[in-house]
Image (tube, coloured by chain):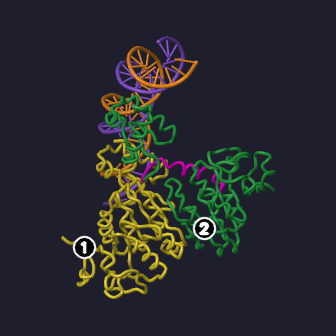
Chain colours: A yellow, B green, C orange, D purple
Amino acid sequence: MLSAERYAKILQRLDEKKTVTVTELSQALNISESTIRRDLTSLDKEKKLKKIHGGASAIGGAYSVVDDEVTLRSNRFPEEKAKIGHRAASLIDNQDFVYIDAGTSTEAMIQFIQAPRAVFVTNGMDIATKLVRKGLRVIIIGGEIKPVTNAVVGIEAINGLQKYHFSKGFFGTNGIDYQAGFSTPDPNEAQVKREALIRCQKAFVLADPSKFNVMTPVSFAQLSEAQIITSKLLFEGYEKETKIMEVDKK
Amino acid sequence: MLSAERYAKILQRLDEKKTVTVTELSQALNISESTIRRDLTSLDKEKKLKKIHGGASAIGGAYSVVDDEVTLRSNRFPEEKAKIGHRAASLIDNQDFVYIDAGTSTEAMIQFIQAPRAVFVTNGMDIATKLVRKGLRVIIIGGEIKPVTNAVVGIEAINGLQKYHFSKGFFGTNGIDYQAGFSTPDPNEAQVKREALIRCQKAFVLADPSKFNVMTPVSFAQLSEAQIITSKLLFEGYEKETKIMEVDKK
DNA sequence: TCATTTTTGATCAATAATAAGCAATGTTTG
DNA sequence: CAAACATTGCTTATTATTGATCAAAAATGA
């Protein structure tokens, strides 16, 4: 196995798990511990990771700073989000021109994306950064950055979206409700979501079960306008309005 | 088989697989390993790939360990950059509408910015993130993200810039030269720089002393179009062409 | 604290990969 | 057309990488 391959695999593992052990890597890659240690030493020298006794830990930098903020928000139902993200990511293939909405639900998709030739558009700074780090082609929507979420919103973002036509789009939401449809608290964000959503041939909303039967101030789409990807459907009736994928089912 | 043909096939393979072995290429292209090695050596010299023991790895992309360019570059003259950045940041006040070009020189400004009411526009993802974290109002230019530098470049970025008129703009450069003026290696980046620069009432170029008397492929401005902020002016004559601030002076 | 266990880095032999030299073949140029 | 030049593949001496071994260092826990 080429050294670069090993480096990549080590870093990828580290990116997902934040720490790795020498033993674990040695077994996972079928490589002697000596070599793993040498690799870790090299990567440490290149500041790609921090070597610690027994293994290595992911390094700080802008990346982890971003992650701290995100971690706070995304710690609600992380396993749910990962499962939902995995399913959502599996829908993307190399021919797609994909919109990914800012947010932690959609962010959970990224690690699972397996379509190196797809092109991505997003209004999420963190999402854009992660996609780029994965080696994918990424276009960021221009406009003012909303502090807490690092999402690009506002009139410029909306204008910037108008030229695009996405084959698939993935969205987060704060509430799903029979009457209100999909909704979020921030009018600016809602507008951007709507503008992007109507430009998608297929739109998917990623939502953990806590989002159902919740209404927030501004609607950005009706239920029929997007399919829902969730882990487990706890309430009845939604499946009459739109297609729902339950990850836990079956 | 023509060498250019082989180069193309090798690079294509690399683009898809991120790493290739000499053996694999030799078999796939029906070419001796010697020739493959020679090809890899050439392509490595042209920075099209990174030669490693046993094969080659793609530059940039996911977990490539080849992006030392940026890491190394930002570590070059960090004190110089900080001093220059400090001086540059002191020029910004609350009334300003500021453009900050992507790059490590300009990134060094951010920590010193003392104008909470100024509004910032940038094409640098990392710069945007840092500015937001400082609590400032930030607008990101939309467009495709260039992997290694995380800068937004391309036609969309240029279009996105056209509506703005900045009171001040801060730029990085790869070379400063009497004839070539300010220049950088990447044509796309140069275009974006130029488009932004001509929209600034006052434009400043941040440059450590190593940048002087250096010419790189694409010019984005003449010396007279921007003031230079540097730590110590080692060459004479430049002060006739434009205003120069020397941080170390006095 | 000290003894036990785990991890580490250095060393080494085996293996794999490389660069350099060289002859044969193919390609330009006058 | 022939001479000069470049490219290719083969051989070989040199070099780099690997995994195993083991003493030293670090972590663990009583």
Cα gap from disc 2 to disc 1, whole angstroms: 42 Å
Q: Residue at x 31, y 52 (%)?
A: A24
Is residue B78 a member of the stretch shown in magenta?
yes
Label 1: chain letter:
A
Residue under numbered circle 1 = A246
Badge count: 2
The kind of residue on which mark 1 rests is Glu
Q: Residue at x 67, y 72 (%)?
A: B115
User: Can you give x and y, in whole percent of width and height, for residue B123 in the image?
Assistant: 57, 62
Majority secondary structure of magenta residues: helix
Say what secondary structure mark 1 lies in.
Answer: strand
Of the 4 image quadrants, the one containing the C terminus of chain A is bottom left
Is residue A172 a member of the stretch shown in magenta?
no
Q: Which residues are magenta?
A: B62-81
**Tag 2 and tag 1 share a subunit:** no
Q: Which image quadrant for residue A220?
A: bottom left
Say what secondary structure mark 2 lies in.
Answer: strand
User: Can you give x and y, in whole percent of width and height, for residue A176 in the image?
Assistant: 34, 82
Q: Which image quadrant for residue A88?
A: bottom left
> Can the viewer see residue A79?
yes
Q: Residue at x 50, y 59 (%)?
A: B145
Up-down relation of residue A17 to residue A153 (above or below):
above
User: Can you give x and y, in whole percent of width and height, for residue A215 in the image?
Assistant: 37, 87
Label 2: chain letter:
B
Q: Residues within 10 Å of mark 1 (few under 14, many from 20)?
A: some
Residue under numbered circle 2 = B121
The kind of residue on which mark 2 rests is Val
Of the 4 image quadrants, the one containing the N terminus of chain A is top left
User: Can you give x and y, in whole percent of width and height, for residue B119 in the image?
Assistant: 63, 72
> Can the viewer see residue A6?
no
Task: Give the farthest residue toward the left.
Answer: A250
